[in-house]
Amino acid sequence: AVHNIDWEFNVGKRLEDPTLERCFKGHKDAVTCADFSPSNKQLATGSNDKTLMIWNLNPKARAFRFVGHKDIITAVHFSPSGDLVASASRDRTVRLWTPNIKGESTVFKTHTATVRSVSFSSDGHKLVTASDDKSVKVWSVHRQRFIYSLNRHTNWVRCARFSPDGRLVASCGDDRTVRLWDTSTRQCINTFSEYGGPATFVDFNASGTCIASSGADNTLKIWDIRTNKLLQHYQVHSAAIHCFSFHPSGNYLISGSSDSTVKILDLLEGRLIYTLHGHKGPVLAVAFSREGDLFASGGADSQVLMWKTNFDTLNYREVLSRHRKRVTPDPPPHLTDIYPRSPHRHHTQNGTVEINPVVTDIQSADPHVVEVGGAPFSMTGARGRLGGGPGYRDRPSTSTASASTYNAREEDEEDEEEERVGCGVTYLLDERSGLPPAFRSTLEHIVQQLDILTQTVAVLEERLTLTEDKLKECLDNQAVILQEVLHNNQLDEERDADSPSV
């Protein structure tokens, strides 16, 4: 039977159970995405309220609210070095932020529709984005420019990820397919299409040998990309799965769903081990920290919950010993096993633990929130950093009552110095430029028009490339047909020559 744990009294009896560490409140709308910094000191979240929040995991440190996107933020990802944060938005742009009080950002504009996903390569040199314009695009981070597009999806692309070695890209979308791309040839090398609805999320495991994908049909599938075979098929949620995250060990996976739960799967045992009830409404974001000791979840209730993993500290010798003693005729396969005799589904099994934490029982007070505004200049992502980094505002916040607003007058001299540094970036731009407001406004308008031209040129380049490919294909086909015609004519002539004349 399913065990129900009383949060207040029994949590200490099972040290391996995950525990709720903190609840972050500051977003004004649904939390759509989350990612931990590589140093494990910060957590980035994006929201339907159009803001990016950087939460410092030190309870006494302030949080930062970055304002710049003009529409819903759909994805967020820290660079491997942790000195940049990428965010994607329904405003058709991708932004690169510095996760500190300066809050400088660079804007990338080439997509012609909502950008659903953004992710760094493992070396931090490239970004991959997915969009409702049916394309996957790869960008250079250092050159801050668009490199190439991957165009084979026939509907919105929901997610795209680099493999750990950077040689592959996996993408999925509303065309009910998961595609694998070779980054060197820029060609689609495999397609998985066994979905009863849109494919919502995709990612590689830590070794890069497998990909997992989730769907609006409530399923989660794991494929071995070396054999192109389905390894595991889970159907443990009762509604669409929005996202998931591999544990760094590759032994566990967490998933968030519209059924308001977070599920934790043991991939070695091939079964569901925990169901977490903490959100009121759909869970839209889940993410493990880089070390796997923490994971976060965000939902339509505007809350960000941070959990301590705990279950990854089990005695693996004991687990593997139990695993070897199993005598079932067709055991669930390991991720490292070869393809099993037949694919089979993993449904909810007995022995799972349901955890219902008291979310309002938080260990620490809510952090002060520093609001970091947008700069007066906006540059196209293909051209470089923003000239004027934003300062932060000390006006009262209109967010939830628990998110206290930073007020410079109430802080010490160190905070006042930080304010002068943050605000000084904008003022420095005005002093250096020495331009009257009217002229600056005209320049902004010109920059916007150039942005539109850049996007138009990018679209034309893509169409020209597709046209060239089609033309080449037509010429090749024409050459084949011509050779066949010549060959047939030659055969006819030979037959005429061999046949006796009447």
Image (cartoon, grey):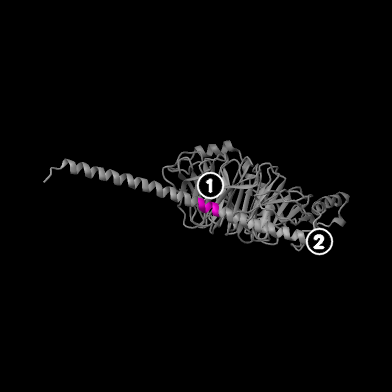
**Dot 2 alpha-carbon crowd within 10 angstroms: few under 14, some 14 to 19, many 20 or more:** few
Number of numbered tags placed on the structure image: 2
Q: Position of residue 403 (x, y in %)?
A: 76, 59
Disc number placed over residue 395 in the picture, else none:
2
Residue 343 left/right relative to 502:
right
Q: Nearer the viewer, residue 111 or 434?
A: 434
The reply to whether callout 2 and callout 1 are in contact (CB within 8 Å) is no
Which residues are drawn in magenta?
A: 460-464
Residue 106's mark? Answer: none
Magenta part mainly helix, strand or loop? helix
Dot 1 corresponds to which residue? 170
Looking at the image, can residue 174 be seen?
yes
Looking at numbered disc 1 in the image, what kind of residue is underneath it? Answer: Ala
Separation (CA) of disc 2 from disc 1: 43 Å
Q: Is residue 430 magenta?
A: no
Work out whether residue 233 or residue 78 is closer to the camera in this orientation and state it.
78
Q: Give SS at disc 1.
A: strand
- Give the SS element for disc 2: loop
Disc 1: CA contacts within 10 A as few (<14), some (14-19) or many (>=20): many
Left or right of 160 in this view: 498 = left
Task: Please check the rendered image and state whether residue 462 is part of the magenta-colored stretch, yes or no.
Answer: yes
Residue type, label 2: Arg
Q: Is residue 19 visible?
A: no
Image point (72%, 58%), residue name = 444
